[in-house]
Amino acid sequence: MGGVVVQTIERADPAIVKALGACGVATVHEAQGRKGLLAAYMRPIYSGARLGASAVTISAPPGDNWMVHVAIEQVKEGDILVLAPTSPCEDGYFGDLLATSMRARGGVGLIIDAGVRDVRDLTAMTFPVWSKAVCAQGTVKETVGSVNIPVVCANALVNPGDIIVADDDGVCVVRREEAEEVLKKALDREAKEEDKRARLAAGELGLDIYGMRARLAEKGLTYV
Amino acid sequence: MGGVVVQTIERADPAIVKALGACGVATVHEAQGRKGLLAAYMRPIYSGARLGASAVTISAPPGDNWMVHVAIEQVKEGDILVLAPTSPCEDGYFGDLLATSMRARGGVGLIIDAGVRDVRDLTAMTFPVWSKAVCAQGTVKETVGSVNIPVVCANALVNPGDIIVADDDGVCVVRREEAEEVLKKALDREAKEEDKRARLAAGELGLDIYGMRARLAEKGLTYV
Amino acid sequence: MGGVVVQTIERADPAIVKALGACGVATVHEAQGRKGLLAAYMRPIYSGARLGASAVTISAPPGDNWMVHVAIEQVKEGDILVLAPTSPCEDGYFGDLLATSMRARGGVGLIIDAGVRDVRDLTAMTFPVWSKAVCAQGTVKETVGSVNIPVVCANALVNPGDIIVADDDGVCVVRREEAEEVLKKALDREAKEEDKRARLAAGELGLDIYGMRARLAEKGLTYV
Amino acid sequence: MGGVVVQTIERADPAIVKALGACGVATVHEAQGRKGLLAAYMRPIYSGARLGASAVTISAPPGDNWMVHVAIEQVKEGDILVLAPTSPCEDGYFGDLLATSMRARGGVGLIIDAGVRDVRDLTAMTFPVWSKAVCAQGTVKETVGSVNIPVVCANALVNPGDIIVADDDGVCVVRREEAEEVLKKALDREAKEEDKRARLAAGELGLDIYGMRARLAEKGLTYV
Amino acid sequence: MGGVVVQTIERADPAIVKALGACGVATVHEAQGRKGLLAAYMRPIYSGARLGASAVTISAPPGDNWMVHVAIEQVKEGDILVLAPTSPCEDGYFGDLLATSMRARGGVGLIIDAGVRDVRDLTAMTFPVWSKAVCAQGTVKETVGSVNIPVVCANALVNPGDIIVADDDGVCVVRREEAEEVLKKALDREAKEEDKRARLAAGELGLDIYGMRARLAEKGLTYV
Amino acid sequence: MGGVVVQTIERADPAIVKALGACGVATVHEAQGRKGLLAAYMRPIYSGARLGASAVTISAPPGDNWMVHVAIEQVKEGDILVLAPTSPCEDGYFGDLLATSMRARGGVGLIIDAGVRDVRDLTAMTFPVWSKAVCAQGTVKETVGSVNIPVVCANALVNPGDIIVADDDGVCVVRREEAEEVLKKALDREAKEEDKRARLAAGELGLDIYGMRARLAEKGLTYV
């Protein structure tokens, strides 16, 4: 059961990737029809990070981080690693040395449905990680996995080259083929929200702005 | 199964509500006989927030935030929303637009046994939220629920107009009718703690301050 | 079933204890052969704390913090309390008054497989705690437990006098008898990592630094 | 903080209680507008039990089953104990001796948001229990709680004298005052389901029986 | 955001599907290179069921089972429903009426990353279900989803027409295109296991049968 | 970091081991002062099994069952395997082939703080297993662990040769040196329970049998 490393993957236009990151998870998730969110247990190791990046995917055995080394060779400027273990695991697959290596290759972060360690150092480096756990447990290098194959990470399908958007709200994946369209819709959404924000801030109610009163009455809502 | 919106609720004296908030969760919980705590999974989205506020309650279907809009109309200065889904849900019912609307109405925060999103923006606004999860998952507006009925939120009963006390330790509810008495006991407790803190800081032991040694011996504690 | 308080325990050399703390959890855990980690759900109440300390252990009934008072009398300069409930519990056994008492006795922190409260005050005091939960729920003083007996805390065995190393990655226990040797290996490890960090930062790959390519091929890894 | 035992509670008509039990949890829950379900983690210790019973409630400290003894004295023919710990606990509050005592008083079962033990014996006795956990951990008798006060059990409010309906689907509570009306609606529902069951068994589709096609189209469902 | 119903899907040869079911989850999972398992929290509602079936997939909103009715129209002899909610939910989407309808259409079971109810009736019908939860909570019919699109169910990707193998060990998905080859490998594996079972039953050790001793020594295993 | 296999361990008298098993988990746990319980998530794969057995312990890497083969060689008549992974894991380390091998060596069961598979076959063989999970996920044989060293399994310390008592209530460990005394106390306890069971069955109350009324009043319990 040897693994596979796919060396050539397509990536989206870096400007689009970056712009999606700036929109943030909630907006992008809405813009693409409320799909693509990773499970809510994926949390950032520190607050305030926000990014858009192209996924280099890793399918790794539980407790074995060998494939992280293999994957880093495949990383290009602006990429992010997305690691899915083949069975649930919280071991610390990744720490400050690997982050140093990632950064040297242009890598910008890690999404891992498992554990991460050296979070104090990673925070000092401002190297962002979204993980299932923080855990110092070391891993081995005994069993091969695969790099740049489609993976299911935290209950979401991620293909190599898909765009990862991540911030304090969590992580969202955007299909590479849909990136441009999703960005357009996200920017639209942002523009519209500006107007609504101003009206709401002025004390107008969502009930009126969105014209909800009639439909609520029709559904049987009663005021007493 | 249409829902109900109760438009008139009684609230406690704002000065008492505010004072309870200043006492903090642990003290208030003790002062009222160790009752009223919401489940420990209710965590603040950022550290350092502390408040006392009057509850406007929401019973909402899973994945449907329509009632939040309805509830905001019922909010008065110093109120907090308390949302309990009718079945377990971690979707992001609430974000920065709704917080903007809340603030415009005088609302001061949110307690939600479900998810919240836009936490970066909410943190920047210093709009405090205690939630079960942070999750960008969007919600629909298809099914009505109720506003200002008694709800069970994170395993605690909350009536509309009850006082919510929340800080980094979690969330506690105080019955409106008991607010004044609980505040009195809480202030008493704080006063007494000052003396104990000084004695403990000086190196005196709790064993001696509280006179525990005899009872420990009687219960069979042995020193070897 | 009266409890026992062991009054005399051996501790490791304070310089070694302190030095282990400075190495951090991940390094120490690796240095001692990847053993001794407490469960990953043990999290610090604030970021950035790092320590090495000698364990004063507590076996306590669920929801009963009487033994904390008993244990504090046994605390010496540089000690940390390690509390294991006899059955799972998230109640807040410990708050700012007990922290004040601990500090007055020279105690430096708390490891608790249960809940802690007053975390805002504890943070202001920079009194570090690693816990399973933050919870304001009060505890009683009705049933005796034991102090300074071996306990299983968060799935790890801790003997009185063992060294606790804790930081943002979690908590690790080092046997007192092995402390010196573990420190030596940890320092070795740190020294070696420096060199690797520099090479990785310069863009060299782990695949080459660690000579992994041949073994990966042998295991069947295929590049496409 | 001494507890209270309320000795006189009202109960619903035994015939209604029994009939509600025969309807089962799903039907009763629907009949009363989808409210009253306890959390889904409440599971029966063996399959096939189904009952309706009047609640004798217990608020008990974590790890302390003293109040069970107190409550059994309050049990009348057809009653069920409903125990809510004051903080989360999985200890085994109840075993075959207490079941023997319950049965001798006419008690018919236990709902416990904590642990139960001796499940092999309880199963042999066909004494039904719905619990959060099976756990042999013993409890103490040191702290008083209360009997027959309103409790929140597994996220649902239960008043003394409310009707508990429980089966393999879980546990549902019916307000005493609403019991008769809920039963009527439940029986109605059952009658209507018979007809639908026959039509569905004959191969007719719910889409047609319930006339859903037009509304689905209107909501934008597309067939490809 | 209207949903889509794909009406024409390809299915594998029924004989292959059935044969895969007879091999069981563990064997099939191994035969296809240890992939395709759904999360371990997916448990059968009763013991002893074992099946192979073709997936008709459902992407459904939380707490909304409308799409189940839509999906049943798409079911053919030997199909199984595979329901993935768009966000985590434990509501009871499915009960005995829907099972009656499924069976009338030739459907053989349900895989649901959410809740199921009427389990007593489903068990009496021997209608097998593997679910995340048993929960009586009712659902609404307000929001459309999709049928027969690829879904991620319990952390595994399932395409319409893929083969579901399920038994007491859980649930495994086999890609339709790989079904024949996986079956061949599974049967091979079963044949080989027979021989090993006989040798192990006779007291021979795996250490010897698999020739592990040398490699263990080489890896540093020491006997004392 | 090569592992160690300890080949010679002491075991308790088989008659005592068997007799402890017959007493059951709850009784033995009480008899030894309420210690030794494994975490409540350790559940039997089928109901009704009950045993006492001597522990052969395994410390195994996550997702690697190599040491099970090594351990089986060390098994003697009446032994049970106790496997603790070095980090949390739910993979299926053990199935019907290993059970066949165990049985051929006189082994009587498995306690595993991880997953087990082939549970249908294991049930048919009446080979009892208490596990954290049922999971078909296969494991590798790449990294060595240790056999017959002290392990922490499901939050309890188990030494090789300790006695495991397991039944439907869970799992309890008894120190080998204390086995005889614990058995004596357990039998005592059983004898005393007989009398109490008869009195309770006759309708006498625990309040009276145990003389609790005065102490309850003293603690402040009030009847209204």
Image (cartoon, coloured by chain):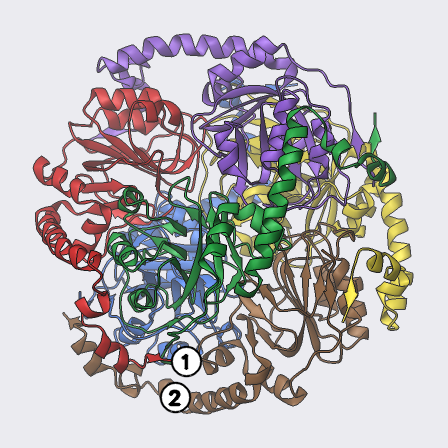
Chain colours: A purple, B red, C green, D blue, E yellow, F brown
Name the element at disc 1: helix
CB atoms of marks 2 and 1 within 8 Å = yes
Of all chains, the one bearing label 2 is: F
Q: Is residue D29 above or below residue D130?
A: above
Q: Is residue A42 visible?
A: no
Q: Position of residue A114 (x, y in %)?
A: 59, 41
> On the rendered structure, is C124 left or right of F98?
left
Q: Where in the figure is residue B116, as x and y percent of width and height?
A: 39, 31
Locate residue C2 relative to residue E68 in the image: left or right. Answer: left
Question: Mark 1 belongs to which subunit?
Answer: D
Frontmost residue, B93 versus E54: B93
Q: Which mark is residue F196?
A: 2
Q: Residue under circle 1?
A: D97
Measured Cα–Cα span from mark 2 to mark 1 = 8 Å
Question: What type is the residue that disc 2 sits on?
Answer: Lys
Amino acid type of the residue tagged 1 in the rendering: Leu
Q: Is residue B128 above or below residue C129?
A: above
Where does the image place residue B88, in percent across and percent down from the top left?
Answer: 42, 42
| Residue shown at the point (47%, 61%) measured from the top left | C13
Quarter of the rendering occupied by the C terminus of chain A: top left
Residue E81 place in picture, x, y as percent: 64, 38
**Who's the residue at 63% across and 39% down the image?**
C193
Disc 2 is placed on an element classified as helix
Q: Residues within 10 Å of mark 2 (few under 14, many from 20)?
A: many
The answer to whether residue E136 of the structure is visible from this angle is yes
Where is the N terminus of chain A found, in terms of image quarters? Answer: top right
